[in-house]
Image: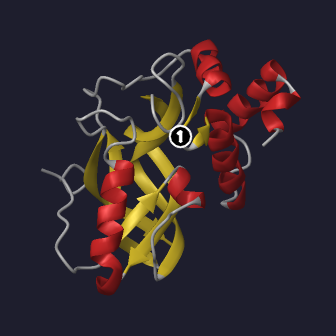
Amino acid sequence: MSSTKRDYEFRDGKGFWVFGYGSLMWHPGFTFAERRAGFLRGYHRSFCLYSHRYRGTPEKPGLVLGLDRGGCCRGIVYRVTDKNADEARAYLWEREMNPTGERESSYHPRHVHVFTDKGVVDAVAFVVKRDHPQYAGKLPQERLLQCVIQGAGGRGTCYDYLANTVRHLDELGLTDGPLHDLLRLARERAGEHLLKP
């Protein structure tokens, strides 16, 4: 099995790197010793997972990002030291392995190689499970817009999630792409009320 497909093995008290491609870029929530821009091959960032808890409800689902197979992805990679490893791991497990509120986790923790300006690091990336009940796959644009506009849950709105992600992609030098287009369309469709806190 290749290194990009192998499940990541967390070891007690052992430091690790973790790759962030969505909300981990702008709200990691754990103590880290180093932060770098990173490039990952073999996966792409996609609004491919329905959210019934954090960014939506069962009646009006939102969407959260997942790493799905194919393509490439730029994001942020964080280094967690041995000292903070157990606490960070427990936090990430709660946050990333069950973002949909289902008993079955929605992501696989995968071992990946992330390219940075200081070399390649071995990291964990949370890759979406395609057989999860809330896996949405590649949705048509109208459905994407509907979920972004309507989605609101325990961690805020789907729109804010999208806007924050786009802002941090801009900081990485990715100033135009599918998520930028989706944000522009959501603003046009829903109006200024989406911009209010």
Looking at the image, which is closer to me, 158 or 9? 158
**Which residue lies most toward the right here?**
192
For the question of whether residue 123 can be seen, the reply is no
Which quadrant: the C terminus? top right
Is 171 on the left-hand or right-hand side of 5?
A: right
Q: Position of residue 147 (x, y in %)?
A: 59, 22
Q: Position of residue 191 (x, y in %)?
A: 85, 24
Residue found 28% across the figure and 35% down from its top: 129
Looking at the image, which is closer to me, 57 or 130? 57
Within 10 Å of disc 1 (Cα), the crowding (few <14, some 14-19, many 20+) is few
Q: Is residue 36 above or below residue 197?
A: below
Looking at the image, which is closer to me, 4 or 134? 134
Residue found 30% across the figure and 56% down from its top: 93
Residue found 52% across the figure and 30% down from its top: 63
User: SS at mark 1?
Assistant: loop
Quarter-of-image position of residue 143: top right
Amino acid, disc 1:
Gly
Location of mark 1 (residue): 154
Is 3 on the left-hand or right-hand side of 166?
A: left
For the question of whether residue 57 can be seen, the reply is yes
Residue found 72% across the figure and 42% down from its top: 176
Q: Is residue 133 above or below residue 157?
A: above
Q: Is residue 76 above or below residue 55?
A: below
Q: Position of residue 122 (x, y in %)?
A: 31, 69
